[in-house]
Image: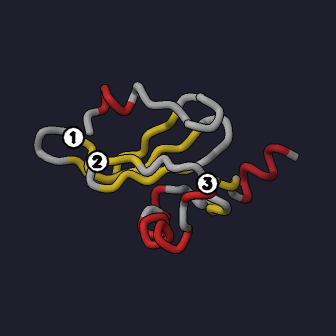
């Protein structure tokens, strides 16, 4: 998927902007693998073969997405995932308090 197309997407829940983290691209600069995160609700949406998985939570199966999310762990900067949402890491939690 091209970045210009990804920039047109929004979170299906709260219609807020998404942040793209790129894992792999092809030679034509199409995004093949990565994930999108909502800047508001912190939901995470993986991208597989250039296609973002943006189903409602009730239709997602964590068991199926878990291998992908574990693969992305090095790109999550210490954040954990619970209920398809990124939780703040320890440093961010201290800043909030």
Q: Tag on residue 57?
A: 3
Closest to the camera, between mark 2 and mark 3, is 3
Q: Position of residue 3 (x, y in %)?
A: 31, 32
- Badge 1: residue crowd in 10 Å (few <14, some 14–19, many ≥20): some
Q: Tag on residue 45?
A: none
| 93 up-or-down from 4: above or below | below
- Alpha carbons under labels 1 and 3: distance apart: 27 Å
Q: Position of residue 93 (x, y in %)?
A: 78, 52
Closest to the camera, between mark 1 and mark 3, is 3
Residue in view at x 32 percent, y 29 percent: 5
- Alpha carbons under labels 2 and 3: distance apart: 20 Å
Residue 38 relative to residue 69: left or right:
right
| 82 up-or-down from 19: above or below | below
Q: Are marks 1 and 2 in contact (CB under 8 Å)?
A: yes
Q: Earlier in the sequence, mark 1 or mark 3?
A: 1
- Badge 3: residue crowd in 10 Å (few <14, some 14–19, many ≥20): few
Give the residue at mark 2.
Answer: 50
Say which of 2 and 89 sits in front: 2
Q: Quadrant of the N terminus?
A: top left
- Alpha carbons under labels 1 and 2: distance apart: 7 Å
Residue in view at x 50 percent, y 70 percent: 66
The outermost residue toward the right is: 97
Give the residue at mark 1.
Answer: 30
Mark 2: secondary structure:
loop
| 81 up-or-down from 70: above or below | above
Q: Position of residue 50 (x, y in %)?
A: 28, 48
Say which of 58 and 45 sits in front: 58
Residue in view at x 54 percent, y 60 percent: 60
């Amino acid at each position: 998927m091209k970045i210009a197309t990804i920039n047109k997407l929004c979170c299906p829940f709260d219609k807020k902007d998404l942040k793209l983290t790129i894992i792999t691209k092809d030679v034509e600069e199409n995004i093949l693998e990565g994930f999108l995160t909502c800047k508001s609700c912190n939901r995470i949406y993986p991208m597989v073969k250039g296609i973002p998985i943006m189903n409602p939570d009730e239709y997602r199966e964590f068991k199926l997405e878990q291998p992908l999310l574990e693969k992305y762990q090095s790109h999550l900067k210490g954040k954990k995932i619970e209920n398809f949402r990124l939780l703040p890491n320890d440093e961010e939690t201290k800043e909030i308090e």
